[in-house]
Image (cartoon, rainbow, N blue to C red):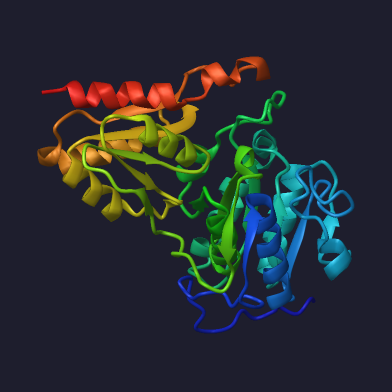
Amino acid sequence: MTQLIERPLGFDDDDVPEPDAQRIAPMSMAQAVNRALHDAMRADARVLVFGEDVATLGGVFRVTEGLTETFGAQRCFDTPLAESAIIGIAVGMAIRGLVPVPEIQFDGFAAPAFDQMVSHLAKYRMRTRGEIDMPVTVRIPSFGGIGAVEHHSESTETHWLHTAGLKVVVPSTPTDAYWLLRYAIASRDPVIYLEPKRRYWAKDVVDTGNPAPPIGRAEVRRRGDDVTVITYGPLVATALNAADMCPSSLEVVDLRSLNPLDFDTVAASVRRTGRAVVMHEGSRTLGFGAELAARIQEECFYDLEAPVLRATGFDTPYPPARLEKLWLPGVDRLLDCVDNAMSRP
């Protein structure tokens, strides 16, 4: 029988992963994810990266480039085109004490792996009363805006958010891309790490020696007084652009972590501004904005000056590439919601 590899006793999900070395450098989001994988694999020999085309090609977006050359084909390797098998293998590896980081090549390709992720990945640690960790980080390039074909531009976050046992994080900056991935790989629980692929080439200075806030913490990206805009991932930049154009003063809250959710930061902002707009790419009905709007209404009702509004995608399948700009919520859709909120008595 294969010997189980023990995870260090006393490890805590809030512990700061130790970076390889302090370094401040400009990076794109794709480069930040690549650097996080390099640093995590260098720090822990149990970390493995695998998926479709991640090794020889370096991934469709070259996010895993150089991992096989640096760490060898046993630690970064290609798999068959079989997402259910990819996640099933990851579950088995985690049971044996390894730390798998599988990639689902595109968001829409996660559907064949749904059973493994919901029935096994999400539930194993609780079913064993915490005796067996499930330190699996599933990387999924997600969301739209790149002009891709069918099944390449889905917003799958609500599937995973409705599944108890899964953490769900969405970076919006290169710094968060690096640190949220480091925290995710260090977690004993499974993490769904959604990468906004239309922001892969956005650049910023990343300090790999100065930890960002951990999973479960939101960030106020812009202070404002009139309306709180709550969003995440690819639409944070859209909200900040809208704030630059809007005559009203917008406060932009970047959730970063969808589960666990930092509702304290959301509530504090809404109580101060009195108005809230939730923005996400997915369809409107039963999107994450619906949950946020309901909770804000429940817990901040007497502080609200207007109903909580939503700027979202439409209740249709994701359209062909030539129509996606009409489908995706943008600055105009957000500003319409802000005007509506400000016009309420």
Give the x, y percent position of residue 209: 56, 74
Closer-to-camera residue (82/45): 45
Give the x, y percent position of residue 213: 44, 64
Tell me: 108 left or right of 265: right
Give me the residue at 63% from left, 64% from top.
25
Closer-to-camera residue (116/49): 49
Tell me: 272 left or right of 82: left
Task: Report the label total.
Answer: 0
Tell me which corner region of the image, top left, top right, bottom left or bottom right, holds residue 248.
top left
Tell me which corner region of the image, top left, top right, bottom left or bottom right, holds residue 3.
bottom right
Q: Is residue 329 above or below residue 125?
A: above
Q: Quadrant of the N terminus?
A: bottom right
Q: Is residue 312 above or below residue 203?
A: above
Q: Is residue 285 visible?
A: no
Q: Is residue 13 above or below residue 283?
A: below
Give me the residue at 29% from left, 53% from top.
265
Give the x, y percent position of residue 345: 10, 23
Q: Is residue 121 visible?
A: yes
Q: Is residue 59 above or below residue 143?
A: below
Give me the residue at 48% from left, 70% from top.
13
Tell me: 303 left or right of 108: left
Give me the residue at 72% from left, 70% from top.
41
